């Protein structure tokens, strides 16, 4: 395909990891960016994309993003990216904390994928990439909600890949480690064999690969992007 004749939707794409993904995809996708902050307008203008101001936890906002992509004639890629759920000590987390996490991480993903799947089925092709966390493999007590629910999302993505693989639809998860948009913790840094935090664009390039035809036989996989951190015993 020629440059930028694909269409992608990226959620929480106004800054950090999400913005890195938007920039990486913009080489060959028109990108519809959904985010709550005003930064969504800046990143969309930067890449000649489309900004949709809204929240991943609002089904109507998700539908507006999908409709904006449909107006471009197709949807090739959907990237599920979200912010951080509540943190707290394991047994101090409330039911509301877990419900907020479910809405943010898990239910929003199912709602978005449910909206785009009919388009994928009609096209006989499509790619879903869920951005989760290294902590889904190595759970962290400092982030129990994220650790548990992102692992659940990864398993749901595997089931989706299995269910719709014969229809030309692929689905994978990308598991980032520490990203340079956050303050450097010396102890964390020492645990990364690469000796540094990742640039958001490095993660974005992995997502762009999974969205591309070069990854046409890659589906149902968890791809860790952490500089070798989880490989260390």
Image (spheres, rainbow, N blue to C red):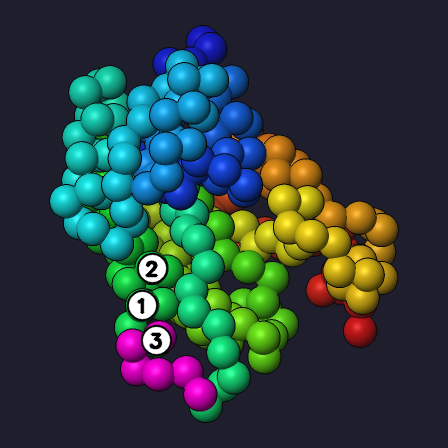
Q: Kindly state the secondary structure of the residue where label 1 is placed.
A: helix
Residue placed at 58% from the left, 67% from the top? 135
Residue 214's x, y, as percent? 55, 29
Up-down relation of residue 26 to residue 202 (above or below): above
Residue placed at 57% from the left, 55% from the top? 175
Residue placed at 19% from the left, 20% from the top? 71
Distance (Cα) linking label 1 and label 2: 6 Å
Residue 84's x, y, as percent? 46, 59
Q: Of all residues shown, which one is farthest toward the top? A: 2
Residue pointed to by mark 3? 98
Q: Toward the viewer: 64 or 183?
A: 183
Q: Kindly state the secondary structure of the residue where label 2 is placed.
A: helix
Say whether residue 94 is magenta: yes
Quarter residue 120 falls in: top left
Q: Kindly state the secondary structure of the residue where label 3 is placed.
A: helix
Cβ atoms at labels 1 and 3 below 8 Å apart: yes
Is residue 78 at all visible to an observer of this figure? no
Q: Which residues are magenta?
A: 92-97
Residue 148's x, y, as percent? 46, 74
């Amino acid at each position: 395909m020629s440059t930028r004749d694909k269409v992608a939707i990226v959620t929480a794409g106004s800054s950090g990891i999400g913005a890195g993904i938007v920039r990486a995809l913009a080489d060959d996708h028109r990108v519809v960016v959904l985010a709550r902050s005003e930064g969504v307008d800046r990143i969309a203008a930067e890449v000649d994309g489309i900004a949709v101001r809204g929240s991943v936890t609002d089904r109507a906002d998700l539908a507006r993003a999908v409709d904006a992509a449909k107006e471009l004639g197709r949807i090739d890629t959907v990237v599920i990216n979200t912010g951080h759920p509540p943190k707290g000590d394991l047994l101090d987390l409330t039911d509301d904390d877990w419900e907020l996490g479910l809405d943010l991480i898990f239910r929003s993903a199912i709602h978005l994928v449910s909206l785009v799947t009919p388009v994928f089925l009609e096209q006989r092709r499509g790619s879903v990439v869920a951005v989760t966390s290294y902590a889904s493999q190595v759970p962290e007590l400092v982030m129990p909600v994220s650790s548990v629910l992102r692992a659940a999302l990864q398993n749901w993505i595997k089931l989706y890949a299995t269910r719709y693989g014969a229809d030309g639809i692929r689905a994978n998860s990308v598991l980032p480690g520490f990203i340079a948009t956050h303050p450097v913790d010396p102890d964390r840094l020492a645990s990364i064999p690469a000796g540094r935090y990742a640039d958001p664009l490095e993660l974005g390039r992995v997502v762009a690969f999974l969205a591309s035809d070069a990854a046409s036989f890659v589906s149902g996989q968890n791809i860790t992007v952490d500089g070798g951190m989880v490989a260390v015993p």
